[in-house]
Amino acid sequence: MKKIKRLYLWSNGMVMAFDDNGEQIPEFQGKAKDVLGLALDALSDRSVCYMGQWSERPISVTPEALRGFAGQFEE
């Protein structure tokens, strides 16, 4: 399994993940309710997490901050 270098949580509830080469990691992309927990568990010490709106520059956040937001995307 590829290691996540950058993980994005967007305000629309979508998640994007990229590896060290900037390639997308499809198994960690999609709706937050489906993939955010898995993606957070796959982070390494070198991973960087971001949150934001698509039309604006995302901000860097801790994995713990993303875990705190995960519940709002559950149905």
Image (spheres, grey):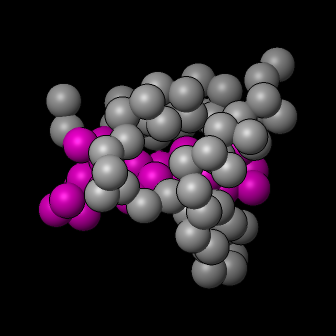
Residue reaching furthest bottom? 57
Residue at 66% across, 27% down: 33
Report whether 75 appears left or right of 8. Answer: right
State the image coordinates of residue 22 (x, y, percent, origin top left). 24, 63
State the image coordinates of residue 50 (x, y, percent, origin top left). 56, 62
Please identify the quarter of the rendering in which residue 55 is found: bottom right
- Quick check: is 6 in the magenta stretch? yes
- Whether residue 24 appears in this view of the structure is no
Residue at 78% across, 29% down: 71
> For this rendering, which residue is in front, 64 or 24?
64
State the image coordinates of residue 11 (x, y, percent, origin top left). 75, 56
> For this rendering, which residue is in front, 70 or 16?
70
Residue at 77% across, 23% down: 74
Quadrant containing the C terminus is: top right
Residue reaching furthest top? 75
Residue at 58% across, 24% down: 34
Report whether 14 appears left or right of 75. Answer: left
Please identify the quarter of the rendering in which residue 69 is found: top right
Residues shaded magenta: 3-25
Report whether 14 appears left or right of 22. Answer: right
Report whether 42 appears left or right of 72. Answer: left
In this picture, is 68 found above or below 19? above
Quadrant containing the N terminus is: top left
- Quick check: is 49 in the magenta stretch? no
